[in-house]
Amino acid sequence: MSTQVPRLFAGLVDDAAVFPPGSASLADALVAHRAHRTAWYADLVGPLLVPASALTQLSALLDPDERIEVGVIGDVPIGRLPALLATADPRLVPRQIEVAVAKRGEDPLPGLTELLALPAEEPRPEPYAVRADLPTPELYAEVPLTWGLLGALDGIAAARAAGTPIAAKFRTGGLAAELFPSPVELAAVIRACRDRDLPFKLTAGLHHALRHTDPETGFTHHGFVNVLVATAAAAEDAEVAEVAELLASGDPLRLVEPARIRRDQARPLWRGFGSCSIDEPLTDLAQLGLMNHGETE
């Protein structure tokens, strides 16, 4: 039979085509996303990520009978999100809502408190029950990897334990070197999430499977297979130093086999990442022999 996308990679890559560095137009991104959703690798691809302020624009581009799963990125004040979501076109199916609760260097707790308070405020609609006919979307609180991080993770974990469908989100790249956490910094965050049984998502910088240095910028990027293997190790109680070693490795021999033996398992903790390119991670997985589409057995 034809080999499908392994379970380990299901929904790994959210389609962030409209965001930098790709910065595709919404119309072009929608055309490409439709192609991804009907391709043999469709199970690899998560929802189309769209700024909250562009939901109406996206609605105007849809076919009359089309429904599309989206991830809503909160580019508007937190207090405006519930109304935007509650009045969204019914053809848009929000799978997740992602909100930055603070800028780098700011205390994340006030923004997190405001975000968590939204469902209890009246007469605002609840952001987690956008419409009765839709499944409840996951809420991702993006927390800067700076001061106040652990307190924010405690707050997110407590809210999740109390029943709020919330998880964490972290930035692993950008247009400045300080936006790329070191292997030790990222390992500590992954282990902190593991200790709290807290799912997380990553964004930015994860363009390729293995850790590498961009020849144009000189920035060293984390590899998404590194993150997969390192997070699996953390879930199995590896300490920060061991997790960091896996994140820092550029040796495919050390990383590919641990990924291969887990291909039929669900990813522990890590929900995936947004990428402006679907082709790059797909190509890397194929070149490493981790997809094997079209083989028969």
Image: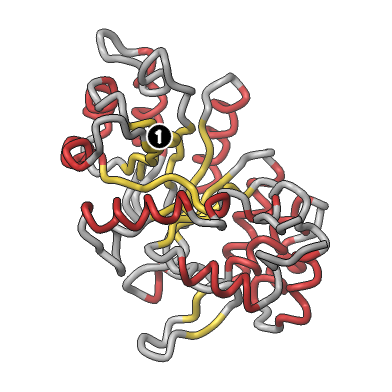
Instruction: Return the x and y of residue 174 as percentages of the image width and height.
Output: 36, 68
Instruction: Return the x and y of residue 98 as percentages of the image width and height.
Output: 39, 41
Q: Residue at x 36, y 48 (%)?
A: 49
Question: Mark 1 highlights which residue?
Answer: 112
Residue 291 shows up from this direction: no
Q: Residue at x 43, y 36 (%)?
A: 96
Residue 225 shows up from this direction: yes
Residue 105 sits above or below residue 77 on the image: below
Residue 94 sits above or below residue 17 on the image: above
Locate residue 78 relative to residue 248 in the image: left or right: left
Instruction: Return the x and y of residue 228 as percentages of the image width and height.
Output: 67, 60
What scheme was used to colour the molecule? secondary structure
Quadrant assignment, res 95: top left
Q: Residue at x 58, y 47 (%)?
A: 271
Q: Residue furthest bottom?
A: 215
Along the viewing direction, whichever of 103 and 19 lies nearer the viewer? 19
Badge 1 marks a residue whose secondary structure is helix
**Circle 1 Cα neighbour tier, 10 Å, few/some/many (<14 / 14–19 / ≥20):** many
Screen quadrant of the C terminus: bottom right
Q: What type is the residue that disc 1 sits on?
A: Leu
Q: Residue at x 46, y 39 (%)?
A: 140
Instruction: Return the x and y of residue 68 as percentages of the image width and height.
Output: 37, 37
Q: Residue furthest top?
A: 123
Residue 158 sits above or below residue 30 on the image: above
Along the viewing direction, whichever of 98 and 42 lies nearer the viewer? 42
Along the viewing direction, whichever of 246 and 86 lies nearer the viewer? 86
How many numbered discs? 1
Screen quadrant of the N terminus: bottom right
Quadrant assignment, res 65: top left
Quadrant assignment, res 124: top left
Residue 109 sits above or below residue 244 on the image: above
